Image (cartoon, helix red, strand yellow):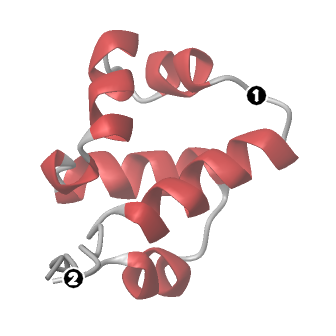
Amino acid sequence: MPRVKPLIEKKGEAMVTLLWGAMALQETSASAVARKVEMDPATMSRRKKKPEDFTLGELLAIGRTLHIPIEELRSALRY
């Protein structure tokens, strides 16, 4: 009998959707945002693939740069 694997919830999916959606709406690139928050663009790319590695400081800086309210950032965090 075949087994069914349970769905694996991605913890950072909501955060990636929020941040990269805001970048798309503001027509800015991830590398431009990375430079504004003094982050290496390669690091920003790695964070997109593994968003649970974002630090709180990085999220706050990116949120300020993209004008995302703190409440939205907080609601996108998954524990």
- The image quadrant of residue 74 is bottom left
Q: Earlier in the sequence, mark 2 or mark 1?
A: 2
Q: Local crowd at mark 2 within 10 Å, few (<14), some, or many (≥20)? A: few
According to the picture, the residue beneath numbered tag 1 turns out to be 28
Q: Nearer the viewer, residue 42 or 56?
A: 42
Give me the residue at 32% from left, 63% from top.
12
Q: Is residue 8 above or below residue 43?
A: below
Q: In the image, 68: left or right of 8?
A: right
Q: Local crowd at mark 1 within 10 Å, few (<14), some, or many (≥20)? A: few
Q: In the image, 57: left or right of 49?
A: left
According to the picture, the residue beneath numbered tag 2 turns out to be 6
Q: Nearer the viewer, residue 46 or 30?
A: 46
Give me the residue at 15% from left, 79% from top.
3
Q: Is residue 64 above or below residue 78?
A: above
x, y percentage for residue 11?
Answer: 26, 70
Closer mark to the observer between disc 2 and disc 1: 2
